[in-house]
Amino acid sequence: MILRSGSVFARRRFLALSGAALSSACAATSQSGSSTAPRAGAGTPPDFELSTLAGGHERLGDHLGKRVVLVDFWATFCEPCLLALPNLDALYRTRKDRGFVVLGVSIDEASNASRVRAEVSKLDLSFPILLDQDTRVIALYNPRATAPYSVLIGRDGRILRRQEGYTAGDRDALEKAIDQALETKPAGG
């Protein structure tokens, strides 16, 4: 699935695609594997604040310097996304007390909020679910708008890893990257 978020035409086309067609596109993206940014000094991620599914707001900047953050972009119509979410939740549940947080950013359109809520409930996800209904945040992080797409951010606020797609083998590599980031103490701490 590719969306050029700077293009109004592409955004409309993206939103108009059927769930089945988009699921196929997501699966193809997942098979492309992951790309990893440089491990250190990869840059500081842009800050953002989004509404949460629970009705509040969540700001990335509130976690920087304190926690290791995984920002995961997903959609209800993306099969690889739905396969990845339970694995991400397991990683979150076992590491949240050590300073790890997952921010699950749904890129579903506003009219699909009930579908997002149903998937989150069905999957019993415990990490915060944020709503990027106008695709503003994904445009900052992943202008191609592939899904699933995740960004791992260290305690120091630097991007450690970017991953496009998700396959069963990706969990081990992600788990290792998260654990290494959790072992690194923030500057001055």
Image: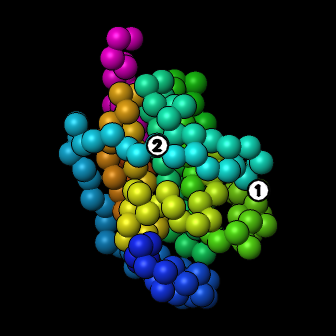
Q: Which amino acid does label 2 sit on?
A: Asp
- The residue that appears at 54% across and 36% down in the rendered structure is 101
The residue lying at 76 percent from left, 48 percent from top is 54
What residue would you read off at disc 2? Answer: 47
Mark 2 surroundings: few (<14), some (14-19) or many (≥20) residues within 10 A:
few
171 displayed left or right of 32: right
The CA span between labels 2 and 1 is 28 Å
**Dominant SS in magenta:** helix
* Vertical comparison of 138 with 64: above or below: below
* Residue 100 on the magenta span: no
- Residue 84 or 2: which is nearer the viewer? 2
Check contact, mark 2 vs mark 1: CB within 8 A. no
- In the structure shown, which secondary structural element does the residue marked by tag 1 occupy? helix
Question: Residue 185, percent across and down?
Answer: 36, 18
Residue interval drawn in magenta? 175-189
The residue carrying mark 1 is: 121
